[in-house]
Amino acid sequence: PETIHRLDYTPPAWLVPEIRLEFELGTELTKVKSTMKVERNPDGSHDQTMHLCGDNIAVMSLSVDGKPAEGWTMSGANLLLPLPGDAHEVTIETHLHPATNSQLMGLYASNGMLCTQCEAEGFRRITFFPDRPDVLSRYTVHMSGPKDAFPILLSNGDMTASGEGEDGTHWAEWTDPWPKPSYLFALVAGELVARKEVFTTMNGRKVDLAVYVRPGDEERTEHAMRSLVNSMKWDEETFGREYDLDTFNIVAVSDFNMGAMENKGLNIFNTRYILADPDTATDGDFDAVEGVVGHEYFHNWSGNRVTCRDWFQLSLKEGFTVLRDQMFSAAMGSEPVKRIEDVRILRAAQFPEDSGPLAHPIRPDSYQEISNFYTATVYNKGAEVIRMMHTMAGPEAFRKGSDLYFDRHDGEAATCEDFVKAMEDGAGLDLTAFRLWYEQAGTPKVTVHSEFSDGTLTLTVKQKVPATPGQPHKKPMPIPLKIALFDRATGSHSGEHTLMVDKAEQVFTFDGFAEAPVLSLNRGFSAPIQLESEVSDADIKFLAAKDDDAFARYEALQQLLTRELLGAVEHGPDEARRAAIAEALAAVLDDDGIDDLMRGELMMLPTISFLIELSAPADPMAIHASRERLKAYLGQRLHDRLTALHDRASAVAYSLEADARGARKVKTQALILLSAADEAETARRAEAQYRAADNMTDRQGALAVMASLDAPARDDLLADFHGRYEGNALVIDKWFAIQASSLRPDVLDAVEALAKHPDFTMKNPNRVRSLYMTVAGNPIAFHDETGRGYRMIADLVLALDPLNPQTAARFVPWLGRWRKIEPKRAAMMRAELERMAKEPSLSKDVREQVTKSID
Ligand code: B3K
Ligand code: ZN
């Protein structure tokens, strides 16, 4: 397959200022007629030939200026059309077959309706077009079809006309006044019902909002609508961004490769990120709906009004929009808890990517299949990079930078460099060296060594950026490192410092201390680095109890836990350290000054995936055993406190308020810690929690704990759950995932049986992920010592690839982590990659991931 390089970018030779699309809709056959006004690009190459991308479509007719076109040829799937003048009208007809489109890219049928997904390169599956984000056009979309099958007809912009046709058909015409790239085109047709509301913008404009779902689901859209209204208001207040059309529509579809899509004025969502009510969605699901609704809405400015010049600039819109959605969720809920969750995701998903064979900078240099670059690096590390600019500038200057960026590039297809420049000019930062964060992959490793004498503290900070594929030698990164120095006696500090670390080795001194202060480092996770600290257990314990930065307090406890968990793998438990942990956690359980949402975070042990990252080459079973052993120890030592907490939290009535949500969070965390110490008691409490539950958070939490136990009630509860929610796809997904996340030794047998269950289907990405992504993320299952887990995932990739390459490719990186695992398992993981590589008909998506993962 061809490799595309960032530095090969050239502007398009032809532009398409206007396009009219006419659809004759049908599930089996949809006819598309595209009429484009095309113009030679004065800044382009003066190529006589217009390059129009196509994928799995054929030309049914083609005319230029009203006459049949001559001299056109096909180059692979693409159309080459010679054009003599500087401006022409090009008309192309194509035929689509939505019912058999299992890739879910382009126009496809889902649950009886028709919908589209075009980002990144799906528009070329609808019609021939210069399908690249720097070609911006004004769209008019006309669609007609049977009224009974497609009562609702939607596209981008505002509906400008509609009417009845012959033989029970009707039609609608939508016009989007804002020029946009083809990846933001969308169309939906089907039987849908909507929750509607009117939003008044900051300048008093009225916007009709609607959330469309399948009949029967409308009751579950209230939270999505509230999240949308909150997003719109927050973006006005925080970034000064106002919505710019009279209509904003959201549609939820059940078959979707990703979370959602920000098509202009017509966001299309995976049902998973829209439908929520207390009986079927957990508190975590509610948060995810809020975050993703916000994310897609925020793209209206960061992505749509200012879009990307080419796909190497993806982080321009994604990194910035993730930061915006993180800030929004923090403002709607608890800022420190949100920060902890975001860092946990970064460490669990992005750190492994950054240290593995698929590592790439947030602005990649090359790709074979762009769908493979919708990664935690581009999204989450991209957000961290812009967050560092926010930290360095401060909120007010940052806002000046973002205002300048939106103002300067409105209506343009911009680059990451444009963003950085606007931040320099608007926020008054010098980001000359900081640009390295866009160029270099790899998580910087930072060590801090401290010495104290004569009242002076000397910190020696060293950093190293590890080699990554294609980047053997790295330069030191500019790292804004927030620190505080605590007085041991008073337990307080005299203010935070942000150290600018930008050399391989650097010394910082601080005077005026009577005794050596306690170091609190990388507060608020001010930089996405791996910190190797020499801080003693005693000082960490001090911070776990006293740090006034909630994140730093969490971090201190995590560090203590990590030391113990990894230390125990090498030479058994450390009694003093275990006792210190139990004491620190007891303080967390007793402290009335901490709310339950934060308490729940503090009670969570580091993930196995994060521990593997720190201990490569790792024995996943030994890490798991160490984790279970510590859980058992803590469950015993804190038994009375945990049961008291479970009792207290169980008495709190359901509501969506923070207190009640916090109670539900600690309730299940208490069971998790108890489970390794006292199975019978945990099973009794989990069953009681399940049976008393009036909401999904409690029910799922209890069932997930139960799924790992050997309790008599286990099978009953699983059957009860399935029976209660039969036909509710999103909850049946949970039923699959809960069983695949079991820590019991029979988990792989269970998964094999579940794959044969009548509710299982390879055609629905949510269902596939609920079973197999959970297996890949469950170390007990995936790292089974026989290699059966690895084989299962490789078999899945091979079976799914012909249907849906994009979703299949997402499973490959799990096997690509073989270098981090002890040699025996590593060999089996690599052998599965080699087996996949031998398959001649692999998709471009899977082939790229497999090939890169083997080396
Ligand atoms: N921009 C979309 C991603 C679609 C990618 C499809 N391969 C979702 C988002 O980040 O908002
Ligand atoms: Zn996005």
Image: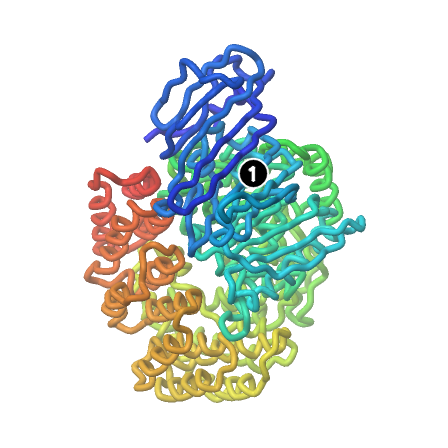
Q: Residue at x 26, y 70 (%)?
A: 750
**Mark 1 residue element:** strand
Which residue is label 1 attached to?
142
Q: Report the front residue among 483 and 225.
A: 225
Q: What x and y, as percent, mark residue 731? A: 43, 69
Q: Position of residue 449 (x, y in %)?
A: 53, 53
Does 283 appear above or below 106?
A: below
Which one is in front, 214 or 282? Answer: 214
Q: Position of residue 674 (x, y in %)?
A: 42, 82
What coloring was used for the rendering? rainbow
Q: Nearer the viewer, residue 734 or 558?
A: 734
Of 161 and 562, nearer the camera is 161
The picture quadrant where one finds residue 662 is: bottom right
Q: Is residue 699 left or right of residue 326?
A: left
Say how many tags the image has.
Answer: 1
Residue appearing at x 61%, y 80% in the figure = 591
Name the residue rendered at 45%, 25% in the picture. 52
Q: Can residue 501 be seen at all in this image of the molecule?
A: no
- Rendered image quadrant of residue 210: bottom right
Which x, y percent locates residue 611?
A: 39, 61
User: Which quarter of the image is occupied by the C terminus?
Assistant: top left
Crowding near the residue tagged with mark 1, few <14, some 14–19, many ≥20 C-alpha atoms within 10 Å: many
